[in-house]
Image (spheres, rainbow, N blue to C red):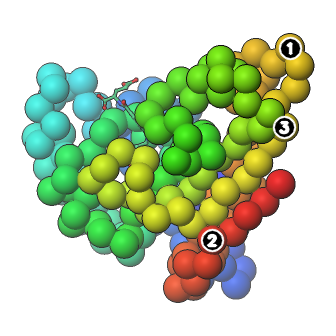
Amino acid sequence: MLRLVEDMTGDHPARPCLVLANDPDAEGLAKAATLGVLTAAIDHRAYKGDRAAFEAALLGRLEAAAPDILCLAGFMRVLTAPFVNGWKGRMLNIHPSLLPKYRGLHTHARALEAGDAEHGCTVHEVTAELDDGPILGQARVPVKAGDTPDDLAARVLTMEHRLYPAVLRRFAGNDRTPLLLG
Ligand SMILES: Nc1nc2c(c(=O)[nH]1)N[C@@H](CN(C=O)c1ccc(C(=O)N[C@@H](CCC(=O)O)C(=O)O)cc1)CN2
Ligand SMILES: NCC(=O)N[C@@H]1O[C@H](COP(=O)([O-])[O-])[C@@H](O)[C@H]1O
């Protein structure tokens, strides 16, 4: 997330208007504030599994900021179809695998368990179907002998921090040509 904020300067067609977290303790909130970006947090745990109520609170805060594009980064809640459909074509996510492989969670461990020679990350449009939207960019990294899930996550994260800003810069400029790195 911070790499997106840091990249939105100069001739970038977008500017950050709000960093909104579902965890009040998210480290990115304080760092985004030091970069001058408005921040807020709505703790999903306060809604005790009522996804519609949690998302209604998200929407209320988002309406005040009126963003053109939502960028999910480490947002670990599955969003309902009504919420997603309200942002159709305007919401992105970065997922730590080469989709369509390994939708969902624990992607690095799953790639290692499968014995994959390469792994990576994907930026995609968010749809109601989990990790299934149109792909806007991918970056590949090698899997190395002896890698642990944390080793692989760190190698992927380095590419995520390159891929997501580059894809957002294109997307905000109305260019949806898929970007391939690595
Ligand atoms: N409708 C959609 N919602 C979300 C999407 C999407 O494509 N469509 N992307 C995810 C991001 N994500 C993977 O990139 C992801 C996040 C969370 C989960 C998940 O299983 N969450 C559990 C809780 C897990 C936890 O709290 O640790 C849940 O919501 O019950 C899967 C994939 C964001 N949302
Ligand atoms: N399923 C969603 C998921 O696992 N998202 C992951 O959260 C991190 C956010 O990085 P950041 O805090 O540097 O933006 C990234 O590694 C991204 O793949």
**Residue 34 image position (x, y, % from top left):** 61, 48
Cβ atoms under marks 1 and 3 closer than 8 Å = no
- The residue indicated by pointer 1 is 146
Q: CA distance from mark 3 to mark 2?
A: 21 Å
Task: Name the amino acid type tagged 3.
Answer: Pro
Cβ atoms under marks 3 and 2 closer than 8 Å = no
The structure residue drawn at horizontal position 76% and vertical position 15%, both measured from the top left corner, is 148
Q: Is residue 31 visible?
A: no
The structure residue drawn at horizontal position 63% and vertical position 71%, both measured from the top left corner, is 178
In this rendering, the answer to whether 69 lies above or below 41 is: below
**Residue 98 image position (x, y, % from top left):** 62, 46
Task: Specify which label sits upstream in the sequence, 1 or 2.
Answer: 1
Q: How many marks?
A: 3
- Classed neighbour count for the residue bearing mark 3: other residues with Cα under 10 Å, few (<14), some (14–19), many (≥20): some
Please identify the quarter of the rendering in which residue 25 is found: top left
- Classed neighbour count for the residue bearing mark 2: other residues with Cα under 10 Å, few (<14), some (14–19), many (≥20): some
- The residue indicated by pointer 3 is 142
The structure residue drawn at horizontal position 73% and vertical position 30%, both measured from the top left corner, is 116
What secondary structure is found at the residue carrying circle 1? Answer: loop
* Residue 155 vs residue 27, the one in the foreground: 155
Q: CA distance from mark 1 to mark 3?
A: 12 Å
In this rendering, the answer to whether 73 lies above or below 170 is: above
* Residue 91 vs residue 131, the one in the foreground: 131
The structure residue drawn at horizontal position 61% and vertical position 41%, both measured from the top left corner, is 97
What secondary structure is found at the residue carrying circle 3? Answer: strand
Q: Residue pushed farthest right?
A: 145
- The residue indicated by pointer 2 is 178
* Residue 180 vs residue 167, the one in the foreground: 180
